[in-house]
Structures are given as structure tokens and as C-alpha cells.
Image: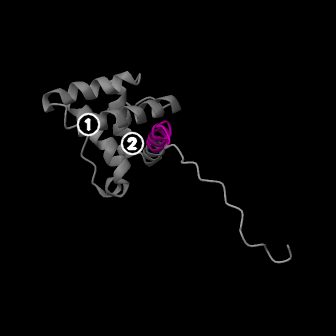
Amino acid sequence: MTYLTRAALTAGFLFAAPALAQTAAPAPQAEAATPAPITDAEVTMFAKAALASDAVSKDATVPAAEKAARMTAAVTATGLETARFNEIAKLAQTDAAVREKVQAEIIAVRDGQQATAPAPTPTASPAPMPSASPTPGQQ
């Protein structure tokens, strides 16, 4: 559960500070099974899950004791299991191609969410008034 919290924050970190991610020394990890290849659908679900869990983590109205459960619910609501979310987050930390793909999808999903917000209603501008003085050549 705590890894989910770190992974959600890492997703924000991946989006906000990729240069720092490239200069940080990787922590020693035990050799684990190679995760399954990541599909485009999983990248999209991961991006939605990362944005949703980030929103929960930044929501000051959510009590700290409830944040982890709500972040988990936000991840699973996208159709992605938390274990797979964590695998993708780990892979994005170590694989530049995955990181770039995830970052691009987070931006696309975020911008798509913003695009679905209602646009401000344009104010109608009055029609131009005809000129009172004749133009040269017209009389």
C-alpha cells in the first residue's frame, strides 16, 4: 500500500521533473521477474490513474488517514490493478522509453480532461458601424 502512495507521487515526479529522475542514483533492488510488456491501453489507464491518485493526494479536504484507500480506489476505478500500476511506475523509473510514453500520455489525458471542461461563452461583438465619412473615390 505504501508503494502505491510512492508510485502515485512518482508519477507526479515523472511528469514534473524528468531531469531529476535521470540524475538520481537507482536504489538497489532484488532481481524480480520481468514485467509483462505494457500495452497502449495500460499506459492510458496508468496516466488516468496517476492523475486521479495525484488529485487525491493533493486534496486537502481528504483526511490523511483516508488518502491511501482513496488513491487505491482511484487507481482501480480506471481498470488497472494496483500491482500492475506499481509495475508500470517502477518500469517508468528505469526505462526511458516507458517513461517518455507515460509522460506523453499523462499530458494527453490531462489536456483532454481540460478540453472537456466547458469553454467560456464568447461575448457577441457588435457589428461594425458604417463609416460616416465617404471613402476616397466614393461620392
The N terminus - image quarter: top left
Q: Which residue is mark 1?
A: 30
Question: Residue 94's x, y, as percent?
Answer: 37, 45
Residue 72 versus residue 130 in the image, above or below = above
Give the structural element (helix, strand or loop) at label 2.
Answer: helix
Horizontal relation, residue 45 to residue 127: left or right:
left
Q: Identify the amino acid type marked 1.
A: Ala
Q: Residues within 10 Å of mark 1 (few under 14, many from 20)?
A: few
C-alpha distance separating marks 2 and 1:
17 Å
Q: Which residues are magenta?
A: 105-119
What is the quadrant of residue 47 in the picture?
top left
Residue 99 versus residue 51 in the image, above or below = below
Residue 26 versus residue 58 in the image, above or below = below
| Residue in the foreground of this view, choosing between 6 and 53 | 53
Q: Identify the amino acid type marked 2.
A: Ala
| Residue in the foreground of this view, choosing between 7 and 112 | 112
Question: Residue 125's x, y, as percent?
Answer: 59, 53
Q: Which residue is mark 2?
A: 92
Is residue 3 something that shows in the picture? yes
